[in-house]
Amino acid sequence: MKKTLPLLLITFLLLPKFLFSQSFTMEQVGKFTFPSELTVDPSGTQIAWALYEQGRRNVYYAKAPDFKPEKLTFFDKDDGQEITSLTFSPDGEHLVFVRGGDHGGSNASSTVNPDNLPQLPKVEIFAINLLSRMIETIGPGDNIHLGPGNQILFLKNGQVWEANAHNMETPKQLFEIKGTVTSMEFSPDGKSLAFTVNRGGHQLIGIYRNEETPIQFIAPSFHRYSQPKWSPDGSKIAFIKTLGGSGAAYPLLEPRHIPWEIWLADVESGAAEKLWTAPKTLRGSYRYFFFSYPDEKELIFESYHDGWQHLYNLDLQSQKETLLTPGNYMVEQIKLNPDGKRILFSANYGPDKADIDRRHIGTIELSDKTLNWETLGAGIEAYPVGLADGSLAYFSATAQRPHLVTLKKGTQTQLLQADHIPTEFPQANLVTPKQVTFKAPDGTTVHGQLFEKEGGPAEKPGVVFVHGGPQRQMLLGWSYMDYYTNTYALNQYLAEMGFVVLSVNFRLGIGYGYEFHRPAYGYYQGAVEYQDIKAGGEFLANLPQVRGDKIGIYGGSYGGYLTALALARDSELFKVGIDIHGVHDLDGRYDFPEGYEVAPDYEKALEVAWKSSPIADLDTWISPVLFIHSDDDRNVNVSQTTDLIRRFDELEKPYESILIPGDTHHWMKWENMIRVSNETANFLKKHLMN
């Protein structure tokens, strides 16, 4: 008599050898909380923030002494309409915010329609009366700035418009001016408005006072002025001066210093004098940064000129700079306390070597320049604001718990809205990523985070995750950026499925000093950073618990570019990949030169850009790929994927693809983010596990 195996045993034997039991789904881990827009009123007694919950975005509010959170808006659909510019009025009686747009991309004020509605949603300004809790629609607009008497200024078509939170009269244009207004700043007494206006090759600082008084221009020149800051008494304006015009056709592949200076102007006369010039080094080059005029004695500014992003004091009398945040770490998310006496920031500082891949909160007392570290440990703390009693509010997370608003007074901390984390969110089942380092072929040390679930088979498939930006840093816990909360959740899900995931912090990213952030020959000038990705794949493949012949890769945006480059150049290493809204053709980075003068290395630069592109190596691309892109992407035009897919069609190369109509680069709809994550996980599973 022939014996047959039990059905249960047959089923077990046919299961993929890599598979082991999963305790949660992508939908469940995708139900993280994500606060943003944390703001404090001028008195330091009220805070507000926006909270993202499965695509629903709402404004919450809390006030001293108990800081009990209260929901003020009820936008309870996953409709892709973000909340930004959340700000208290100077008297603390109103909250004003913008709803709509995509402020993580270009054309931020353009409407977003991921539901593909027949009538486009609007990008609108709203005001909440904190006494009555009534919400009023101010009207279409963006880039708000609040002034005295609940005056609401905002930019519309490059001009300044005016509304008022106390009376819902139709907004009107405040004044007319040639050019595009780019920023504005009220004087301390609220009677004057300093603004910057771009007029092509130069940018001016103007002062508007009233309908009858001509606009005053501060020390007009053929340069570019930016970041005007009033002195506390309103008699002076400090600003940044950079070069105007287009300049000579210098070699394109040669890194060059971008000069900048700090100037101080007398408001009455309009005359200005130079206070400080940045060192003429690559490290000392200009980039947009924190700049403040907290008291009559000093300016506080951020600079990279010692090799790390640090804060400096500039004494107005001696015109000498003093480093306020010494050490091998970077500062970001910098705020001035409401009373003007303290600077708050987050930094990748701490006594543990792993802290370079975390964020903690620091403060500087301006009276004596004392530097204090308010938080340390294994968590992630970001976006601090100061309160009236000396306490702090900020966002905090761990490797398992997503971000929540946190209060700190002395040594005591209090989490707000912990009850908003859904019961099905698998907090207890998430892994703690491990800090790892490895060497690129040129000797550069590269950091990464390794996600791995305990148990399962002795050998597992591996996945390399490549972040976008590229000026980003992935952390040993939940990210403080919305896009990377999504990918952190996906990395956790892939680890839960049985993959070993390596998140690579490649060159061009922040957190490891200037030379790492701004290497020569990066991106379209040689893609030097790709060697970090390949080294990461080889590091992962050589781990004893990883199958070296089962390595996949995925990434979005700049990570999509490097994913495509990996599949095109090294299909033998990277067996499969998911290229999410990546960049594929880089020679278009250079405009065709006009006129007689041409950079001496123009043709060489075009050649290098082409060879830095994934499309240059399609002949060796044999790995299966899934392309994903939305067609309202404001960061990477969908044509980058359309054109690459056409080349695949012409070469009859196999591929899979998903086009998502109406959404943007940032998956404004939670539903789309979950879909993209599930499709990514399933594609990796199909090719590396099945």
Image (tube, rainbow, N blue to C red):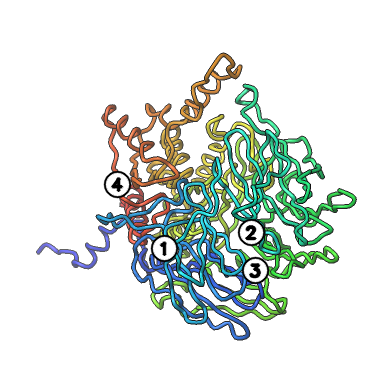
Task: Please tell me which residue lies in front, 216 or 647.
Answer: 216
**Which residue does the numbered mark 1 point to in the structure image?**
496
User: Cα distance, mark 1 to mark 4?
Assistant: 24 Å
At label 4, counting other C-alpha atoms closer than 10 Å, the crowd grade (few under 14, some 14-19, many 20 or more) is few
- Say which of marks 2 and 4 sits in front: 2
Q: Nearer the viewer, mark 1 or mark 4?
A: 4
> Residue 665, position in %: x, y?
41, 49
Q: Quadrant of the N terminus?
A: bottom left
The residue pinned by badge 4 equals 658
Judge whether 638 appears above or below 109 on screen: above
Q: Residue furthest top?
A: 596
Give percent across and percent down for residue 215: 64, 47
| Dot 1 or dot 4, earlier in sequence | 1
Q: Position of residue 243 (x, y in %)?
A: 68, 34
List the residue tagged with mark 2.
Answer: 333
What's the residue type where badge 3 is placed?
Val
Name the disc covering residue 335, or none: none
- N-terminal of the pair, mark 3 or mark 2, is 2
Check disc 3 and report the residue beneath it: 385
Query: Which of marks 4 and 2 precedes in the sequence?
Result: 2
Residues at badges 1 and 3 in contact (C-beta under 8 Å)? Answer: no
Residue 393 location (% of width, % of height): 63, 73
Dot 3, how many residues are within 10 Å of its Cα: few (below 14), some (14-19), or many (20+)? many
Q: Cα distance, mark 1 to mark 3?
A: 36 Å
Who is closer to the viewer here, 598 or 630? 598
Instruction: Indicate whether 275 appears above or below 620.
Output: below
Residue at disc 3, secondary structure: strand
Q: Locate residue 613 relative to residue 218 in the image: left or right.
A: left
Q: Earlier in the sequence, mark 4 or mark 3?
A: 3
Q: Can see residue 456?
A: yes
Q: CA distance from mark 4 to mark 3?
A: 41 Å
